[in-house]
Amino acid sequence: MKKRNLALLINANNTNTSFALTTKNRIVRTVKTPTAAICDIPFSADDYREVVLASVVPAATKKLLRLLPVQPLMVDAFIELGIGINYPRKRQIGADRLANAVAVAHLYGAPAIVVDFGTALTFDIVNARREYVGGVIAPGLASVTEYLYQRTALLPRIRIAEPRSIIGKSTVGAMQAGAVIGYRGLVKEILAALRRERSLQDAVVVATGGYARLIAKKLPEIQHVNPMLTLEGLRFIYLHNR
């Protein structure tokens, strides 16, 4: 593909940073790296002409700006997004949350709720007028289990996975049950509370992020899982700013 047909999308979060090459129609290649370990751009500067950067990590932003060969379009609530913003403190909205809101409005319609299973668990709301209006933030699933490991003398660090039974037959099994099944309860209750808002009774619910498939597979409240949702949002933002 010729360089003029490609743009570089970057989503820098607290745990990982995703890089993607995209045409105007689709994302063609992705690379993910731990944010703390960023040392270069995984694509040649010959591969792209324009860059869209969404970052919630100031240190990563500074490093990426030094590494990039061109000035990127920085995602925030003050650029052309293709959706409205109805939120009193626009500077406080994370760039990844804006990208999710853009993607869900374009791909699934509105009203909509995005559940992002990242380092934090976020719920972001787009109303029927295609406006971002706010959301909910809760601890991420990995953060919860890591806290138990760090703050207790005998509980181990675990791999988060579907438990074999609600009744744990080992410490790991008990922790997996508490983490996964308990976390589904957290997500289900927050979604139920959001659904009680008259404007969200018919909202589509879309999940993304690292643990989206694991948690969503037994939650009928979530209609769609899209691991590429944030990057798709950056692609739409790129198109709105060409």
Image: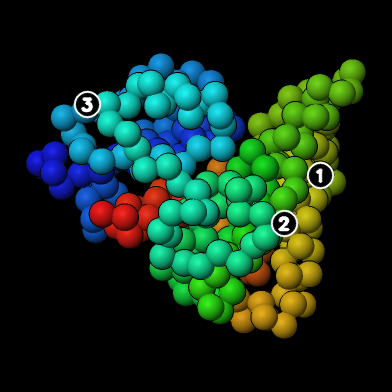
The three-letter amino acid code for the residue at tag 3 is: Ser
Question: What kind of residue is marked 1?
Answer: Gly
Specify whether 56 is left or right of 33. Answer: right
Tell me how far mark 2 sits from mark 3, CA to CA.
38 Å
- Alpha carbons under labels 1 and 2: distance apart: 22 Å
Residue 239: percent from left, percent from top: 29, 57
- Label drawn at residue 44: 3
Res 54 seen here: yes
In-image side of 45 versus 159 (left or right): left
Residue under the image location 52 percent in, 54 percent down? 77
Element assignment for label 1: helix
Return the x and y of residue 211 as percentages of the image width and height.
60, 46
Residue toward you, 72 or 38: 72
Find the distance from the CA under tag 1 to the CA under tag 3. Answer: 44 Å
Q: Position of residue 95 (x, y in %)?
A: 52, 47
| Residue, disc 2 | 136
Name the foreground residue: 81 vs 44: 81
**Location of residue 139 with respect to 229 vertically, above or below:** above
The numbered mark at residue 178 is 1
- Label 1 crowd bin: few (<14), some (14–19), many (20+), radius 10 Å: some
Q: Is residue 30 visible?
A: no
Give amino acid for label 2.
Answer: Val
What's the residue at 43%, 54% (across, down)?
A: 79
Q: What residue is rendered at 20% in x and 44% in y?
A: 6
Callout 3: helix, strand or loop?
loop
Mark 2 neighbour class, 10 Å CA radius: few under 14, some 14 to 19, many 20 or more: few
Residue at far left of view? 2
- State which quarter of the image contains the C terminus: bottom left
Q: Nearer the viewer, mark 1 or mark 2?
A: 2
